[in-house]
Amino acid sequence: MAVDKNKKCMIIGAAPIASKAIFDEFNPAEHYVICADGGYDTALQYGIRPDLIIGDFDSAETAPPEDIRVLKLPVQKDETDTMSAAMVGFKLGYTSFVLVGCLGGDRFDHSVANLNVLLYITNRGGNGVICTEDTKIFVMRTGRVVFTDLKDATISVFPFDGPSCNMTYEGLEYPLFQKNLIAGDTLMGVSNRIVDDRAEVRVNFGCALIILYTPKTKP
C-alpha cells in the first residue's frame, strides 16, 4: 500500500467518546483510520468508515463487516490491540499518529497501557498524541512543543521512561530554566498555566509526559 504523505494514522480505541467534537478537530477523512477492537463501535456511532479493523474482538459489540479489511488477533498475546494498531501503522509507513478513544473508560490500566503506546511511537522516531475533547497527551524526548493562542490552558509535565527529565518552560505562569523534574520528588510539574499567546515547553534531556488540558467553554 502506498502511504499518502499528507495523511496521519488515526487509531480509534474502545474508550467512550462523548461527542463528535474530537472528529471535528481531527477529520478521519484526512487520516488512515485503524479501529482497535471496540473502537469499531465508536466508528459506527459517528459514521466513520475505517480503513482497517484490528483486534481480538473481546470488547466489540458489532461484528466487523466483510467489506472492510480485518486483522484478527489472538486473545492471548503480549501487546494490547491499540499497541498492535500502532505496530501495523508503522509497518504501513506512517510515523504520525492520533489516538482517540484511548483515555478513560472503566479500565484505568488500558489508559496507562496507551501511554506506553505513545512511548513506543516516540522511541521509533514517530510522533503521537492521545486526544480527548479537552485533553492532549504527548511523550517527548529531547525537543520542544509550542502552544499558541491557548491562554489559561493547563500544562502538566512528568518524568517518563526514566527517573527525571530536564525542562525549560516559557510563557507559563511558573517558568523553569533547565530544571530537573524527578519522579517521586516534591517539585511536581502539575497544573501550570499558559499565560502568554505563545508558550514553549522544552525537554532538554530525558523523556517527559506532557499533558495539555483545555477547559471546556462555559455556556
Image (tube, grey):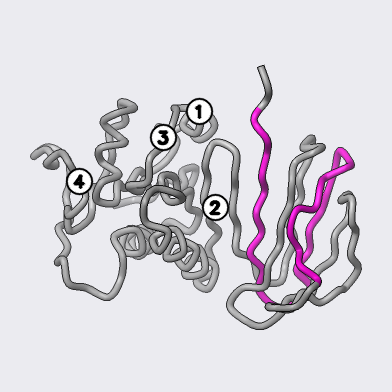
Q: CA distance from mark 1 to mark 4?
A: 22 Å
Residue pointed to by mark 1: 21
Q: Of discs 2 and 4, which sits in the foreground?
A: 4
Instruction: Find residue 89 and report its horizontal and vertical position in percent.
Output: 36, 58
| 194 inside magenta stretch | yes
Which is more N-terminal, label 3 or label 4? Answer: 3
Front tag of 3 and 1: 1
Spatial CA distance of label 4 from label 3 is 20 Å
Which dot, 1 or 2, sits closer to the camera?
A: 1
Q: How many marks?
A: 4
Residue reaching furthest top?
219
State the CA–CA distance, disc 2 to disc 4.
23 Å
Distance in Å between CA atoms under marks 2 and 3: 15 Å
Looking at numbered disc 4 in the image, what kind of residue is underneath it?
Ala
The C terminus lies in quadrant: top right
Check whether the beta carbons of the residues at disc 4 and disc 3 lie within 8 A of each other.
no
Residue beneath disc 3: 28
